[in-house]
Amino acid sequence: MNPSRPHKPSPRLTRDTYPGTLVVGGGVIGLAVGWALALRGEPVTVLERGKAGREASWAAAGMLAPITEVAFQEDTNLALGLDSLARYPNFVARLQAATGLHVDFRTEGALQMALTADDSARLAEVYGYQRARGLAVEPLTPAQAQALEPGLSGYVAAAYLCRQDHQVDPRKLTAALGAALAQSGGQVLENTPVERFVLEPGKPPAVELGGNLAGEVWPARRVLLAAGAWSGLVAGLPDHLRPPVRPVKGQMLALRMPEPHPLTRFLRVVRVPEIYLAPKSDGRLIVGATVEEMGFDREVTAGGLYELLKGAWEALPGAYDLPVVETWTGFRPGSRDNAPILGESGFPGLYMATGHHRNGILTTPATAYHLSRLMLDGLASDLLNKFSPQRFNRPRAS
Ligand code: FAD
Ligand code: GLY
């Protein structure tokens, strides 16, 4: 014990050990893993400090885009993204059947475009990378791109169609996951922050709660840390277990497409290097997103909106006249190596599912599938092993 610090007595355990899983964080990841566990009969309680699904999962555009959002040298992330994309149709079908809630899963694909010679050369590099990995991307002539999406700029310099990248409405997805979890016997306790972990060798992991349950310490058979960009901030984790997650700010806005609108055939996600446009079935056209290292700054800025609107107008000139219906920010949980952190923490019974960065909506089904098998059956797939939290574990300071 460090003699310079007062010795605190062990916390009083105010509950019997919870026989199932406590999930810290009610975003898309915590809810989806919780649902997968509950479907297997595991008692699950999701502890959410605010309202479930109102952070990054609310802010996201909902693109399911492992191919058009591929990043050089991130082949492990690509493998997870493709694994998850393949699971999406079945995942959505089960979710919608269980809840009767529609999540706006759309499969028209995505267009990658360049409007300048410079961007055209960059996109050609990306296309080479995609092809080398056998990803299905078709080069289009500008005329073919405009025939697909007549609202596009007349200055298309290069275009590629990816039929396999899809999209979903992330707000509807999280609402449906919350309903599905409840239906399968799980529960979400909102306004219930986890103030700290209580980790004592030889004992089950426990969490100390705040809010109306302030001061209560709940031990559980298993605890899953799924607190998004805040995952590294929950107290009580020793440094060597603390996941290196930081907030990566994104600013977004939504335009309203008129009904009936002149862009009636604007169906696909359209990406130019600076921005993307994601049309939703409710008439919103999502324009995203900035990528900023600004800590937990929630401001929507003039510069951020300017960049988004400029990019939208350049790609889709008709956007000039569309009403802005919403602006917002969100925090992507970015890890030190940009890869998710999934698996056993190194403390028995404590698991992690965080660091999903720019692709957490995409990788939700894979996270839920692989994590639930690990947690309930002890089965770690080769894929899951690549994302182990223990890749960051530092040796204990002596
Ligand atoms: P969150 O949704 O942030 O959930 C974490 C939850 O934990 C929060 O509800 C929070 O309140 C709670 N919490 C935190 N601390 C505590 C605590 N101590 N106790 C209890 N609860 C706590 N991904 C895609 O796949 N496609 C996209 O198109 C896409 N677009 C994006 C656009 C933007 C602008 C942003 C910001 C993100 C985007 N993402 C996208 C990424 C995606 O949104 C995230 O990867 C995903 O939502 C992460 O989910 P999560 O559940 O880990 O985090
Ligand atoms: N994946 C889109 C974003 O993070 O903005």
Image (tube, rainbow, N blue to C red):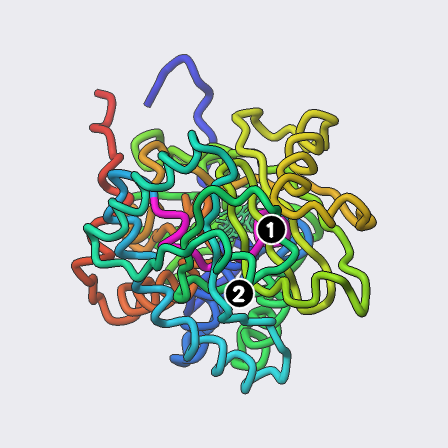
Query: Is residue 213 shown to the viewer in this render?
Result: no
Gap in angstroms between the C-alphas marked 1 and 2? 36 Å
Which residue matches tag 2?
45
Q: Please state if 130 lies on the left or on the right of 212 as rendered.
A: left
Residue at image coords 47%, 64%: 109
Q: Please state if 48 lies on the left or on the right of 91 as rendered.
A: right
Looking at the image, the residue that sits furthest to the top is: 4
- Inspect the image, locate mark 1, and give the three-letter code of the amino acid beneath it: Leu
Quadrant containing the C terminus in the rendered view: top left
Quarter occupied by residue 219: bottom left
Residue 391 in the image, given as x and y percentages of width and height: 22, 39
Quadrant containing the N terminus in the rendered view: top left
Residue 43 higher or lower than 17, as above or below? below
Q: Which mark is residue 235?
A: none
Tell which of 185 and 342 is nearer to you: 342
Residue at image coords 42%, 29%: 118
Q: Which mark is residue 277?
A: 1
Indicate which label's residue lies in the foreground, 1 or 2.
1
So how many labels did they put on this image? 2
Residues in magenta?
A: 56-70
